[in-house]
Image: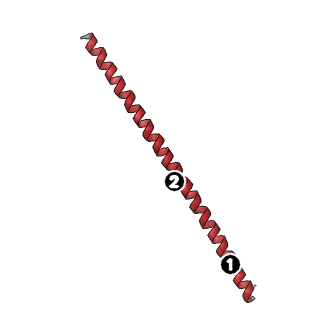
Amino acid sequence: MVASLSSRVRTLCLILCLLLVALAALLLDASYQMNRSLRWVTHSSQVLQTATQALTELQAAESGQRGFT
């Protein structure tokens, strides 16, 4: 009976270790996906900022061309 209990404890520890490794892998994957999403958000923000700046400069050039300075 002692050997049986010992093997059950070892099996339980193995299952818990495998579960811990699986959870760590899921956490690593979620972290990677969040990092990629953050890079896209940063890129989109930069694109919007550049587009806004270009529009502002274009409007200023049009106004200058018409003489509305």
Residue at image location 40% in from the left, 35% down from the top: 22
Q: Which mark is residue 58?
A: 1
- Residue 59 to residue 22: above or below: below
Number of other residues with Cα within 10 Å of mark 2, as a class: few under 14, some 14 to 19, many 20 or more: few
Q: Mark 2 falls on what kind of element? A: helix
Quadrant location, the N terminus? top left
Residue at image location 31% in from the left, 14% down from the top: 6
Q: Foreground: 36 or 67?
A: 36
Image location (x, y in percent) of residue 41: 55, 58
Q: Which mark is residue 49?
A: none
The kind of residue on which mark 1 rests is Leu
Image location (x, y in percent) of residue 24: 44, 36
Q: Which mark is residue 37?
A: 2
Name the N-terminal-most of marks 1 and 2: 2
Image location (x, y in percent) of residue 53: 67, 71
Disc 1 to disc 2, C-alpha distance: 31 Å
Asked if marks 1 and 2 touch (Cβ < 8 Å), the reply is: no
Task: Describe residue 41's horizontal placement relative to residue 8 as left or right.
Answer: right
The kind of residue on which mark 2 rests is Ser
Number of other residues with Cα within 10 Å of mark 1, as a class: few under 14, some 14 to 19, many 20 or more: few
Q: How many marks?
A: 2
